[in-house]
Image (cartoon, rainbow, N blue to C red):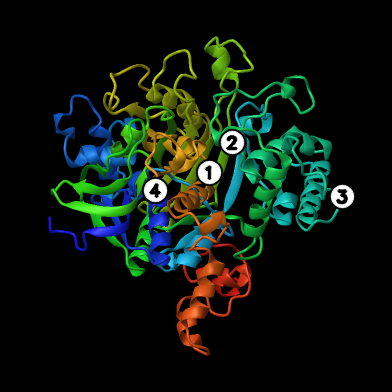
Amino acid sequence: METIQPSTFDLVVLGTGLAESIVAAAAAKAGKSVLQLDPSPHYGGSWASLRLSELRSLLQSLSPSNAASEGRQARQAAASGIVEGEIWQQQPEADLGPDAQYSIDLAPKVAYGGGPLIQLLLGSGAHHYLEFKLVQGSYLLNLGRDDARAASQGQPPLQTVPSSRSDVFKDRMLSPLQKRSIMRFLKAAAEALEGQGPLKDAFGDQPVQELLAQQGLDKQLQLSVLHGVLMADCVPGQAPGTAASQQQQPDNLLPFQTQLTAEQALQRLRVYLQSSGRYGADTGPFLTPLYGGGELPQAFCRAAAVAGAVQVLRCGVEGLVLEEAEEGTPGCCTGVKLSSGQVIGCQHLAASETSEHLEAFCTRGGTPCTTLRCAAILDGPLVAGKQQTLVCVLPSAEPAAQAGTAASPQATPPPVVRALAVCSSTAVCPPGRYLLYLWAAAPPVGADSDGSSAQQQAARVLQPVLAALADASELQRAAAPCGQQSAEPTVLPAAPGAKPRVLWAAFYSQSTSIRFAAHHSSGGGGGSQWPANVVPCPGPDASATFISAVEGAKQCYRLLFPPAGGANVDFPLDTRVQRQAEQQQGEPGDEQAAAASGLAEADSDDELVAALQAALQPAARPGIEPAALP
C-alpha cells in the first residue's frame, strides 16, 4: 500500500458507517483535515448494502468449521457487527435471479421526508449522490389481536397507519366514531405544535398512552398512533390508568424502548406531520433510498471528499498510539498505526463503536446489545398494489406463556418487530422478486434467564412474524447455523391463504455495544476510561428511522470539537449554516454558483427540500405526476 500523505490530520475516523461518515463530512466542512480508514473493500461498515453472494459468504465465514474465516472476510464480519447467522431456502433451491441485481441492507431503516437526515443531506450536498422512493403504505400488525374477518381470508390483520385525512376516511377497518376520534386528536395536536388549541398545555411529562386514552382513542387507535405514527418501540401493558400501568418499567430496556412522555411524543409528531404529504398530495412521510441504505454513508463520504477529506478502503489498523499519562488515566491518542507500518498522527480520533481498538477503554460500561434481523426474498409484494411498505408488528403474549415464563413487572417485554418490504423499483433486487426485512431488539445480555443465544432469540422472535406475513412453509434450513450447531425444527410452520412465498431467508444477529452511551454517560472524554480526544460513533440500533444515528453523530462531533465557552453552536451540516457560509463566500449577485449548490435563495425548509426533488423518484400513484410535485 502506498504511503498516505500528509501523515498528520486533525481528525482520523476509523470506519465508514453512517455516523462516522457524517462526523467526517461535518469536520471537513468545518475546515478540518480528515482521514477516514476502513479495512473493508466497500463503504458502510455495519450499514452496508451487499450483494446476495456477499451476504452468503459473510454468514458462512462465521462458521467455527470455516478455517478460511481469517483475513478479509474476518475483517468484514467484524466491521458489520454480525456475530451469528443462518440461511433458509427452498428445496430444491428457487431461482432468485442475477446476483448482481441484489443490494441487501445489513441494517435497513426508513427516512422521514422532512426529518433531520434529509436536512443533513441538503446541508452537506450529499443529496446530489442519492435517489429515493416513497414508502407507499404504513401498517400495523397486532399478532395478539383476533380478527375473524382477516383470519377467514387467510390474510394478516394489517391496519393502515394514517398519514393523511384521505388515509383515515378510506380505512374500512375503522368505524365512523374511530375516524372522528383520530382526526380530532391529530387536528388538536397540530394546533398544539403552534401553541394553540385545547391541547396546547396537555403535552407534559405524563406517559403519552394516558393522554391518548384521555382524548377518547380506543386501544386500537392508541396502538396505531403509538407505534405507527410516533414510531415507539415500547410495548404498553395494561390500559393507561390501571394499577399495572403505574408499575416501574423494566430496568433492562434499551433507551429507545422506554415509554414516551407526551412532550417527547409531540416532537415526534412534529416530524411526522412535516414529512407527510411533502412530496405530493396524500403521500406518506417515509422515504427509502435507491440501491439500498448503504448508499447513505457513501454519499456522506463523497460530500466529505469534496470538502477535502481523504478516504482509504482496504486499510487495516494495527493499533492506536497513546501518549504516556499518569497512572489510572489514559493518555490522549496521538495517532494510529496502519497494517503497512505507517503511523498517522492525529489531534482527534472517532471510531465505530464496534472497533476492536476501543476495547482497552471499556473496562466497564461496554455491555453489548444485539439486533435480531432477517432478510428474506419473496415472489410477490407484501401488500397487493404497494411496492414499498412499512409494517410495525406487535408481539403476541403467547410465546412467553408457552415457554412457562412467570409474569414479572421486571421481565423484559416481547420486542416490537419492524418490517420493510421493497421491490425492484428501488434497484435492490431483480424484477419479480421482493425484499422483506425484519428486525427487533434482543434483550440486553443478562436480561434473559434461559441462556438462549442471539440466534435462538432471532428464531423465536422473527420466524413467527415471517410466517404471519408470508408463506414460509417451503423453507428449510440450508445448513447448520453459521456460528452454531444444527438444531430442530428445520421447517417453518405453514401459513394459510394467498400470501407471497418466501424463496430464501437469512436470519442473523447484529451486535453493537453501548460504548457510545457509556462514553456520554461518563461525561465524554472527562471520564477516567476514555482519552479526551477519542469518541466512539454509534452503530445501527433497532429503531425504525435514522434519527438516532443522526443525533448520535451530532453528539460525537460536539464532543470532538466542543464550542468555545460551551456555547450551543449550529452543526456544520445544518442547512442554515450552509446557506450562511455560501452567502459569506459567494460574491453578491452570484446566483449561478448558489443555484449549483441546490440551496439558492432558500428562505424556508419547504424551499430547501425542493433541492431533493430531482433525486426523489415518486412512486406511481393514480393522478399524481412527477411534474405536479411541489
Whole-percent x, y for residue 541 in the image = 47, 39
Q: Closest to the observer: 440 or 157?
A: 440
Q: Is residue 356 above or below residue 180?
A: above
Label 4 belongs to which residue? 433
Q: Closest to the observer: 566 or 33?
A: 566
Q: What amino acid type is highlighted by mark number 4?
A: Arg
Q: First in sequence: mark 4 or mark 2? A: 2
Which residue corresponds to the image point at 51% horizontal and 57% vertical from the top-left? 563
Evaluate if marks 1 and 2 touch, with contact meaning CB atoms under 8 Å apart: yes
Q: First in sequence: mark 4 or mark 3? A: 3
Label 1 belongs to which residue? 544
Evaluate if marks 3 and 2 touch, with contact meaning CB atoms under 8 Å apart: no
Label 4 element class: loop
Label 3 element class: loop
- Specify few, some or many for label 4: CA neighbours under 10 Å numbering under 14, 14-19, or 20 or more: some
Whole-percent x, y for residue 147 in the image = 67, 30
The span from disc 1 to disc 2 (Cα, nearest Å) is: 9 Å
- Specify few, some or many for label 3: CA neighbours under 10 Å numbering under 14, 14-19, or 20 or more: few
